[in-house]
Image (spheres, helix red, strand yellow):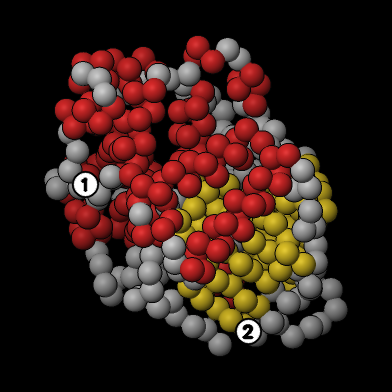
Amino acid sequence: MSAAADPAAAPGAWQVAAQRVTELDEIRAAVSGSIEPHGIERIGRPRPFDAHNKFGEIGGLRLVQLRYGVDVMIDRHETLATNGVLIETPLTGHSKTTSGRQSVISTPTLATVLAPHLPTRIHYSHDCEKFVLRIDRHRLARHCEALLGRELRRPLEFELGFDLTGGAGRDWLQLMHHMQAAIEQENLLLRSPLAAAQFEQLMMTTLLLGQPHNHSELFQQPQATLAPFYVKRAEAYIEANLDQPLSVAELAAQAGVSARSLQAGFQQYRGTTPMAYLRELRLQRVHEALLSADPQRSSVTDIALQWGFGHLGKFSVAYKQRFGESPSTTFRRWR
């Protein structure tokens, strides 16, 4: 039985994509819609499906609560156009995950952090129920670059097993449960774009500082290489006001410096301009909206205009350069 998401629900509130599913194709479609495309096959002794899949969002974070109710093998690889870094935490049961050259048994005390560019196979036990937190890899990479003050030359690749019993792992687990409570209660994090943006940044920072990855050593270098406060302040203001008309003068005023200083700071520490940074974030939001939009309620034009792209021809060119396909192709991907 499928249950469509309630269009009147508050942004981020739990949406049920599928409940008590009995068909393999149905649960594949539901989970693909809430997380990303993937391959799936039943394994082990026959059992009736008792699948459940619901999700909610805060900022650019998507939290999915998922179970299959049977032993399944999930196949995740780059040919399926995966763009999310997934942090998977079993609530019950266990799963065996092999990603690249790493392999772990994941339990409620050991999460896994999956990079989208690595082929991954996951064996869910029949009693496994998980939280899956999805972070867009481009947003996470940009945040890492913002913290480091330099461009990443390699995709982020985390150590697979994430210990949740102490230190940063325990902090991460608390933040995830806080996100769950915020979604269930529809609290301030859902109603305030600024609060949502700050929470998203906190989650990404906790992951980047707390879980080893292939750029961790850069965080140990002297802090003088980090971007100055006014660049970070302007970035935070941009992320919290992406759907508003913004100018360099307004950003400079919010950052507390002159427009010339702001331009120079972005050029030195980000290798770009404030308005190019703004456009990049808006393109990402359009991309996310196109993937999840209801074609009966919106169109590519509606979404582009919503995020400040008034010249549709230039928008289409910029979008294709950024994502390698036209906006209409992305819009049709899940249809």
In the rendering, at what x and y percent does residue 312 appear?
17, 49
Residue displayed at 40% across by 19% down: 228
Structural crowding at the residue carrying mark 1, measured as other residues with C-alpha within 10 Å and reported as few (<14), some (14–19) or many (≥20): few
Q: Which mark is residue 163?
A: none
Structural crowding at the residue carrying mark 2, measured as other residues with C-alpha within 10 Å and reported as few (<14), some (14–19) or many (≥20): some
Q: Is residue 222 visible?
A: yes
Amino acid type at mark 2:
Arg
In the rendering, at what x and y percent does residue 260 appear?
21, 16
Q: Is residue 272 above or below residue 143?
A: above
Q: Secondary structure at mark 1?
A: loop
- Which callout, 2 or 1, points to the residue nearer the camera? 1
Q: Is residue 318 above or below residue 2?
A: above
Residue displayed at 33% across by 70% down: 294
Residues under labels 2 and 1: Cα distance? 41 Å
Q: Quadrant of the N terminus?
A: bottom right
Residue situated in front as seen by the camera: 54 or 311: 54
Tell me the quarter of the picture where residue 21 sits: bottom right
Q: Which mark is residue 244?
A: 1
Q: Quadrant of the C terminus?
A: bottom left
Q: Is residue 103 above or below residue 214?
A: below
In the rendering, at what x and y percent does residue 226 appear?
48, 18
Q: Which residue is mark 2?
A: 20
Tell me the quarter of the picture where residue 93 sits: bottom right
Residue displayed at 41% across by 58% down: 188
Query: Is disc 2 in contact with disc 1, using a CB cutoff of under 8 Å?
Result: no
Amino acid type at mark 1:
Gln
> Closer to the N terminus: mark 2 or mark 1?
2
